[in-house]
C-alpha cells in the first residue's frame, strides 16, 4: 500500500545548512551578570555552559535567568547553579526535519551541533533561525508571494495568512502589576513575552524575557512596577495579513514575535512568533506543501 | 623600554551606567581631543577601577539585527528607517550590558617586548595599564609599532 509522506519546504535539508556557526559559550563558574551581557550583545536566547575541560555540560536560557531573578538570586551567582543539563545534540549531516522533531518532542528550542569528527561544538540549531531559511526558499520559489504579486491575474495559489498560524490565546497582565506577577504569567504560559493592558483594557506595551533580564542586571527588584520595564508601542500586525509579510516584518524589525490584531487595532486576538512559523514548517503558500507531497511505497 | 614610557596618559573612560548613545558621543569626543581615531574605550567605575572595555565592534555586533543574512535577499524593502526603530528599542541598554569584561591588563613596568607579544598572540590593539585596580594609562598598538620601528631603524 502506498504511503503518503507529507513533505514540507524544509525536506531534504541538512542541519549543517540551517545551523548558526557562532555558539555563545561560557564556563560554569561565570556569573549570571556575565551571561546576561552575552545574551544581550549576541541576541541569543540561551548560552552553552562548559566545564573546566571545555566540555559542554549545560545550557542557561533566558527562562532560567528569569527564574533566578524571581527567586532573588544575586547576579553574581555562578551559572552552574541555574544551568540545565546535559545539552541535547545533533550532527551536521542529520536531516533538519528529524532534528526539528527531536526539538518538538523534547520541548526545547535549540539543539547544539557536534562536529562529525571531533567532539567540539560546531554550531547551534535554533527555531528562529529556521525562519530565515523558510523565507529564503519562498523568495526563490517561482510561486512565491512576491513573484505572483507582479502578475496578479495568474494568482491562483491560496496563501497562508497570519490567522492560520498564530496562537489564538493571548494572556495579558495589567500595567499596575509588579514584575513578579509578570514573571508568574510568563512561566505559566511558556511564552517569550506578555501583553500589558491598562485599566480600560487597551494594549499599552509588551514585557519580554529580554526586558526582564536587562532589568535584573540593572538591579531592579521584582517588587517594582511593570511600566518602566515594558516596551511600547505593541508591535502588531493584522490577522488577515499574509504570513510572508508578517515574517518579513519580524526579521527586519528584529523582533521575535508580533501580536495580532483584528480589523480594530486595539483588539489583540493572537500572537505570532518566529518559532510558530518554524514549527509550522512551511513558507508562505499552500502550493508549497501540496507540491511536495510524495507518494512512497 | 617599559609600559610607562610609551603609554598614553591622556585618555577617556566610559562609565558602566552610560547609555549606548552616550558612549557613541564619547567616542567622538575622545577622538577629537586625543587627535587620533578611537576604536575602543576603557570602562571604569567611580573609583577609576577598570571594569571592562567597549569597542566600536562591540556596539556594531549589538546594533546589527540578528537575521541580517537574509537582508541581501529582501530587495523590495528599504531598510532605512528600520535602524531608527531599533535604536529606539535599545534605549534601555547600558555600556555594562554589552562591554567586554574579560580584559587583559599590563602594569607600568611591563616590558615592551612582552606588550608586543600579548598584542600579537591575543589580537589586541589596546592594553590598559593598571596600578593595583586603578587605570593609569593605555598602550595602543601604534605606540608599540613606532617604538619598535624606531629601534630597528637606528
Image (spheres, rainbow, N blue to C red):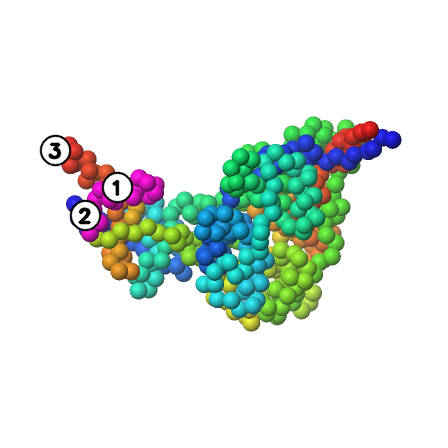
The earlier-in-sequence mark between 3 and 2 is 2
Q: Which residue is mark 2?
A: B2
Residue drawn at 61 percent across, 37 percent down: A15
Q: Dot 1: within a 10 Å radius of its alpha carbon, few (fewer than 14), some, or many (20 or more) residues? A: some
Residue drawn at 58 percent across, 39 percent down: A19
Secondary structure beneath label 3: loop
Residue positioned most to the bottom: A223
The earlier-in-sequence mark between 1 and 2 is 2
Please state if B110 lies on the left or on the right of B20 as rendered: left
Mark 1 → mark 3, Cα distance in angstroms: 19 Å
Q: Is residue B134 above or below residue A21?
A: below
Can you see residue A202? no
- Which quadrant: the N terminus of chain A? top right
Kindly indicate the quadrant of the structure image that contains residue A76. Answer: bottom left
Kindly indicate the quadrant of the structure image that contains residue A279. Answer: top right
Please state if A168 lies on the left or on the right of A186 as rendered: right
- B72 vs B114, nearest the viewer: B114
- Chain ID, mark 1: B
Q: Which residues are magenta?
A: B109-124
Q: Which residue is mark 3?
A: B154
Q: Dot 3: within a 10 Å radius of its alpha carbon, few (fewer than 14), some, or many (20 or more) residues? A: few
Q: Is residue A295 above or below residue B6?
A: above
Q: Which mark is residue B116?
A: 1
- Chain ID, mark 2: B
Q: Which numbered mark, 3 or 2, is in the foreground of this view?
A: 2
Secondary structure beneath label 2: loop
Amino acid at each position: 500500500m502506498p504511503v503518503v509522506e507529507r513533505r514540507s519546504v524544509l525536506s531534504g535539508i541538512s542541519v549543517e545548512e540551517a545551523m548558526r556557526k557562532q555558539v555563545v559559550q561560557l564556563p560554569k563558574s561565570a556569573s549570571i551578570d556575565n551571561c546576561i551581557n552575552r545574551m544581550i550583545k549576541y541576541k541569543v536566547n540561551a548560552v552553552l555552559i562548559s566545564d573546566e575541560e571545555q566540555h559542554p555540560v549545560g545550557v542557561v536560557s533566558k527562562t532560567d535567568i528569569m527564574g533566578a531573578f524571581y527567586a532573588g538570586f544575586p547576579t553574581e551567582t555562578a551559572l552552574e547553579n541555574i544551568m540545565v543539563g546535559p545539552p541535547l545534540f545533533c550532527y551536521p549531516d542529520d536531516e533538519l526535519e528529524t532534528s526539528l522533531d527531536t526539538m518538538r518532542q523534547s520541548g526545547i528550542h535549540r539543539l547544539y551541533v557536534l562536529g562529525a569528527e571531533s567532539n567540539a561544538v560546531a554550531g547551534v540549531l535554533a527555531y528562529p533561525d529556521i525562519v530565515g531559511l523558510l523565507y529564503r526558499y519562498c523568495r526563490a520559489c517561482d510561486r512565491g508571494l512576491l513573484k505572483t504579486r507582479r502578475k496578479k491575474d495568474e494568482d491562483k495559489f491560496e496563501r497562508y495568512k497570519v490567522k492560520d498560524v498564530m496562537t489564538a490565546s493571548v494572556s495579558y497582565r495589567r500595567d499596575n502589576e509588579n514584575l513578579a506577577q509578570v514573571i508568574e504569567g510568563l512561566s505559566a504560559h511558556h511564552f517569550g513575552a506578555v501583553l500589558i493592558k491598562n485599566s480600560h483594557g487597551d494594549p499599552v506595551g509588551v514585557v519580554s524575557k529580554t526586558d526582564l533580564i536587562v532589568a535584573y542586571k540593572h538591579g531592579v527588584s521584582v517588587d517594582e512596577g511593570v511600566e518602566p520595564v515594558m516596551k511600547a508601542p505593541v508591535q502588531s500586525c493584522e490577522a488577515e495579513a499574509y504570513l510572508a509579510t508578517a515574517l518579513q516584518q519580524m526579521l527586519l524589525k528584529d523582533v521575535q514575535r508580533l501580536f495580532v490584531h483584528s480589523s480594530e487595532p486595539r483588539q489583540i486576538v493572537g500572537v505570532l512568533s518566529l518559532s510558530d512559523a518554524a514549527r509550522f514548517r512551511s513558507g508562505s503558500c499552500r502550493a508549497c506543501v501540496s507540491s511536495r507531497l510524495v507518494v512512497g511505497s | 623600554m617599559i609600559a610607562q614610557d610609551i603609554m598614553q596618559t591622556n585618555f577617556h573612560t566610559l562609565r558602566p551606567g552610560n547609555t549606548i548613545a552616550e558612549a557613541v558621543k564619547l567616542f567622538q569626543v575622545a577622538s577629537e581631543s586625543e587627535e587620533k581615531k578611537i576604536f575602543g574605550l576603557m570602562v571604569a567605575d567611580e573609583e577609576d577601577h577598570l571594569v571592562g572595555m567597549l569597542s566600536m565592534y562591540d556596539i556594531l555586533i549589538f546594533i546589527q539585527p540578528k537575521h541580517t543574512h537574509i537582508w541581501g535577499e529582501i530587495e523590495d524593502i528599504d531598510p532605512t528607517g528600520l535602524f531608527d526603530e531599533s535604536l529606539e528599542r535599545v534605549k534601555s541598554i547600558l555600556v555594562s550590558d554589552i562591554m567586554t569584561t574579560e580584559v587583559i591588563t599590563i602594569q607600568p613596568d611591563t616590558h615592551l617586548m612582552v606588550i608586543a607579544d600579548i598584542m600579537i598572540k591575543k589580537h589586541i590593539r589596546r592594553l590598559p595599564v593598571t596600578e593595583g585596580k586603578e587605570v593609569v594609562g593605555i598602550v595602543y598598538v601604534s605606540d608599540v609599532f613606532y617604538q619598535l620601528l624606531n629601534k630597528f631603524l637606528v
